[in-house]
Image (cartoon, helix red, strand yellow):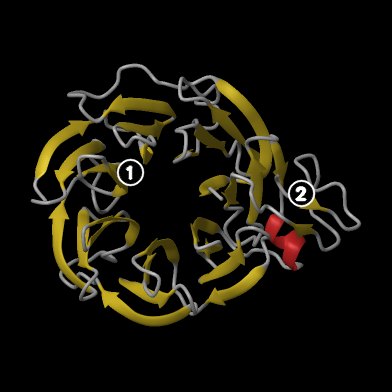
């Protein structure tokens, strides 16, 4: 039998219709398969937040971190990763990572002294990596103690730009691949046995996301930069790379001026989904890009379309974040595998990330 989804002390307005909480709230998400939504907030405003959504009851709780711990989350929450019942929340502009109990949202510790952290990848029970936008290094820490244990230099001294700004990470055997997004065109290859940079793969300009499919093919999505960029502006692209040989096997190109992002895989790891104003879907075996969107956004002219995308790894349901105007609270829409709307709910400002809890 499921435990109580939440226990409120003095506050009953924490659901989607409420504003900021007043009193301490004790949560119990144990046994609930759900998803944390990382709401980025506005740069320099310190108004990022966490929401929690239960897909069975369709209940959403906003301001989870602040409600439980009596303190704001910080400035620009970037991402969240769950490992061993712990949630690691990367707060980019605050230069830190908060660690919470994923079952209760209770604060357990922090990792500080970071420059501009972005994402976390867990290598083992004693080792994890943190990528960074500006530090030109990957930080190594122990996820069981939260202590920083080392770093992997990734600086490109030959470039006039701030390279390499590591981003998302995927692993194949003992190798971690990370995309370098801002003013860059490289996928870096890290040996997890030695914690050394051992190779790089040149791709199109500004790779913003990557995944690895069931056949160990790495897919990389690039946005091509922007008009007037000193690094250049080109057509965005999608590349297929063999993880074993590190050779590029196939490339696709979008039109100049398009902005594809948030590359994801379904639970079977044989279909790709990504954002390009709308949600697009294609099989990993397809020889060309899809011609029609899978899920259509109604706000492409006014606000530029959908903002974030994630796929539930247990059932392939689709979660789409809509930042609207980045000033008001955003929306999250949940869709079935066929693209049918299941639910829609309000969260915090600029929902930009998702972390699935699968107790």
Q: Tell me the residue at 19%/62% (across/down).
A: 189
Q: Can you see residue 329?
A: no
> Where is 258 relative to 8, above or below?
above
Q: Nearer the viewer, residue 326 or 180?
A: 180
- The secondary structure type at the circle numbered 1 is loop
Residue most extreme to the top? 292
> Where is 306 relative to 128, above or below?
above
- The secondary structure type at the circle numbered 2 is loop
Q: Is residue 69 left or right of residue 149?
A: right
Q: CA distance from mark 2 to mark 1?
A: 48 Å
Q: Which is nearer the N-term, disc 2 or disc 1?
A: 2
Q: Are marks 2 and 1 in contact (CB under 8 Å)?
A: no
Q: Position of residue 166 (x, y in %)?
A: 32, 62
Q: Tell me the residue at 36%/16% (across/down).
A: 292
> Where is 248 relative to 345, above or below?
below
> Where is 90 relative to 287, above or below?
below
Question: Badge 2: how crowded within 10 Å, few (<14), some, or many (20+)?
Answer: few
Q: Position of residue 120 (x, y in %)?
A: 41, 62
The image quadrant where one finds the N terminus is: top right
Q: Nearer the viewer, residue 240 or 43?
A: 240
Q: Position of residue 214 (x, y in %)?
A: 25, 40
Question: Badge 1: how crowded within 10 Å, few (<14), some, or many (20+)?
Answer: some
Q: Can you see residue 143?
A: yes
Q: Which residue is mark 2?
A: 4
Q: Which residue is mark 1?
A: 226
Residue most extreme to the right? 10
Q: Which mark is residue 147?
A: none
Residue most extreme to the front? 1
Q: Nearer the viewer, mark 2 or mark 1?
A: 2
Q: Tell me the residue at 63%/28% (across/down).
A: 343
Q: Tell me the residue at 88%/58% (across/down).
A: 9
């Amino acid at each position: 039998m499921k435990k109580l989804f939440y226990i409120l002390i003095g506050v009953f307005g924490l659901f989607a219709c409420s504003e900021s909480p007043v009193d301490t709230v004790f949560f119990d998400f144990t046994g609930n398969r759900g998803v944390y939504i990382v709401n980025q907030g506005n740069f320099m405003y310190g108004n990022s937040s966490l929401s929690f959504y239960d897909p069975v009851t369709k209940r959403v709780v906003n301001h989870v971190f602040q409600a439980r711990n009596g303190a704001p989350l910080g400035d620009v929450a970037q991402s969240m990763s769950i490992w061993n019942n712990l949630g690691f929340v990367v707060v980019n502009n605050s230069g830190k990572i908060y660690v919470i109990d994923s079952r209760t949202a209770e604060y357990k510790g922090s990792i500080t002294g970071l420059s501009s952290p972005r994402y976390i990848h867990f290598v083992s029970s004693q080792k994890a990596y943190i990528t960074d936008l500006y530090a030109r290094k990957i930080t190594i820490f122990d996820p069981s103690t939260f202590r920083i244990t080392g770093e992997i230099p990734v600086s490109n001294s030959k470039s006039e730009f701030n390279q390499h700004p590591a981003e998302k990470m995927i692993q194949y055997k003992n190798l971690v691949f990370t995309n370098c997004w801002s003013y860059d065109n490289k996928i870096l290859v890290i040996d997890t046995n030695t914690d050394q940079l051992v190779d790089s793969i040149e791709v199109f300009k500004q790779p913003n996301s990557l995944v690895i499919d069931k056949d160990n093919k790495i897919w990389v999505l690039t946005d091509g930069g922007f008009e007037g960029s000193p690094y250049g502006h080109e057509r965005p692209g999608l590349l297929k790379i063999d993880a074993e040989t590190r050779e590029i096997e196939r490339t696709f190109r979008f039109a100049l001026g398009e902005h594809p992002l948030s590359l994801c895989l379904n639970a079977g790891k044989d279909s790709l989904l990504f954002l390009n104003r709308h949600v697009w879907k294609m099989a990993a075996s397809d020889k060309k890009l899809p011609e029609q969107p899978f899920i259509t956004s109604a706000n492409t002219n006014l606000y530029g379309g959908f903002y974030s995308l994630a796929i539930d790894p247990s059932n392939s349901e689709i979660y789409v974040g809509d930042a609207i105007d980045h000033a008001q609270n955003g929306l999250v829409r949940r869709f079935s595998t066929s693209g049918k709307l299941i639910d829609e709910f309000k969260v915090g400002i600029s929902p930009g990330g998702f972390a699935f809890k699968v107790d």
